Image (tube, rainbow, N blue to C red):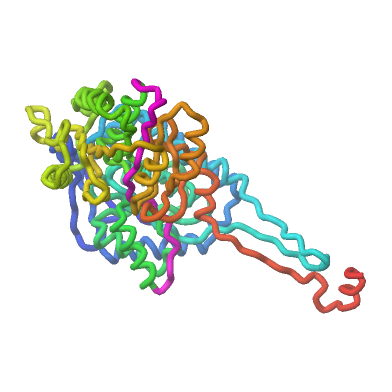
Amino acid sequence: MKHYDLFIDNKWVKSSIGETFTSTCPATGEVLASFEEAGLEDVDKACQIARRTFNSGVWSRMENNERAKIMLKAADIMQRRWDELCRMEALDTGKPIHEVETGDMPYSIYAFRYFANIAREINGELVPVANEPYMHDYMTYEPYGVVAVISPYNFPLHLLTRSLAPALAAGNTTVCKASSMTPWTTAILGEIIEEAGFPAGVVNIISGKGSTVGEALASHREVDVVALTGSEQVGRRLLELSARSEIIKKNVLELGGKGPVIVEPDCRYEDTVIGVADGLLLNGGQVCCAQTRLLLHDSLYDRFIADLCRELQKRKPGDILDPATRLGSMINRAQMEKVHKTVMDAVADGATLVCGGEPFSGPLFDKGAFYKPTLLCDVREDMKCYREEIFGPVLVVMKYSSLDEAIDYANASKFGLGAGIFSESHKTIHYAAQRLNAGSIFVNMPNTARMNAPFGGNRNSGIGREYGKTGLHEYLRTKNTIWNMAFGYPQEQRDIYF
């Protein structure tokens, strides 16, 4: 079993508190690797070094093309280590390696390539000053300073790099912390950063509990921006810490969701049944923008529920390293039990359990956290299963009779990350897309994201956007410079003016 130290200032160092922890495969219970657990002294050291490095200009004032070359080299190294990284990510998260190879890893690598290249195009702007030609007003975009990146357990490397890459491309220095449940590929990233030739102190990687290490990082005086993908609860906590910190931080938060998906009578029926199942079951339902509230037109209701139930029952887990497996484990048994309790509470409150509602059993599953895809009907708006994010393979269903009613049901949520609709009517699609309150609208497809298009939530689903040029500018601050070019020369100023 390999052991990983903290990565600070391009050095592998031991924790100041002398504590370690291990990561375990959620599908098999196998212990994978051990890691140093950072203490407060380590957090402070990483943040101080990131600040010193930023102030030195070795990265922040490096020409954009030179930064891009180093980031592209990191992407090439990740590509070379593809098989190793994919296997690690699958084992650490319990998800099928097929998902890692088609989602997590391509996105992680592309993040470095995409943001390295668009950072070459960071330009300022001239602000015209009417009737005062001697006044020169211009805007520039500058890195903030130190960015703390805190990533979750569901897509450890992908959701780390989608914040890390634009932060680096913009010229910031960084301190990264992965979930203590899935730290493996983040630790490996230190090796990649070192080999790629990043200057010392640009990327620092620490590991440990969110309640101690994460909070200390998010409230540290030297941190300017906190980028988190996580739960609503954790997002609220980081906002509290920012408000109490000596230096208030900018927060880029992608939080929870309770994604609605509307199914209209004119949908492509068979494809929609599969699409709804896919929108629920990516990563075992452990996706913030998963489509977990099905709003189903009453004319389709009985037939669709029966066919969807059959489709969900086809989705069975297997060996997560088998490329044919499509359904994996939840992150741990505690989360699985939490999901199961929510399902049982919903049934006790009047919901109808159509399928699922229990863990998979058998020799392959006894050591893991495998939960059956679950369908709950006869759900009301006031039920917890309809209002709260379950973060598991559970779909709740409500019936509607008009599109406006469906949109009202969809918007009756404190979340607003993603929303979907299946229809063949361009008018319906356009109308619904305008009225649905969500950061992303998925039309005739499951939930997804694209590196060159912004992604993020409204309401309690977050603040700011990741991906695309919008995502790059989350890590750039705007400065305005106004220059009186005729200052001290009143006659010249008068001549220019008149």
Q: Nearer the viewer, residue 348 or 190?
A: 348
Q: Nearer the viewer, residue 304 or 117?
A: 304
Q: Please tell me which residue is depicted at 42% across the width and 60% down the height of the picture.
A: 251
> Residue 102 at what x, y percent from top left?
37, 29
| Quadrant occupied by the C terminus | bottom right
Residue 476 appears in the picture as rendered = yes
Q: How many numbered marks are there?
A: 0
Q: Nearer the viewer, residue 39 or 333?
A: 333
Q: Is residue 350 left or right of residue 396?
A: left
> Residue 364 at what x, y percent from top left?
11, 28
Residue 205 appears in the picture as rendered = no
Rendering quarter of residue 252 = bottom left
Image vertical order of residue 245 relative to residue 308, above or below: below
Image vertical order of residue 45 relative to residue 441, above or below: below
Rendering quarter of residue 323 = top left
Q: Please tell me which residue is depicted at 43% across the width and 56% down the height of the picture.
A: 463
| Quadrant occupied by the N terminus | top left
Q: Please tell me which residue is depicted at 82% across the width and 68% down the height of the picture.
A: 132
Q: Is residue 498 left or right of residue 36?
A: right
> Residue 390 at what x, y percent from top left?
23, 45
Q: Is residue 17 left or right of residue 421?
A: left
Q: Magenta stretch?
A: 246-270
Q: Nearer the viewer, residue 88 or 450?
A: 450
Image vertical order of residue 10 relative to residue 313, above or below: below
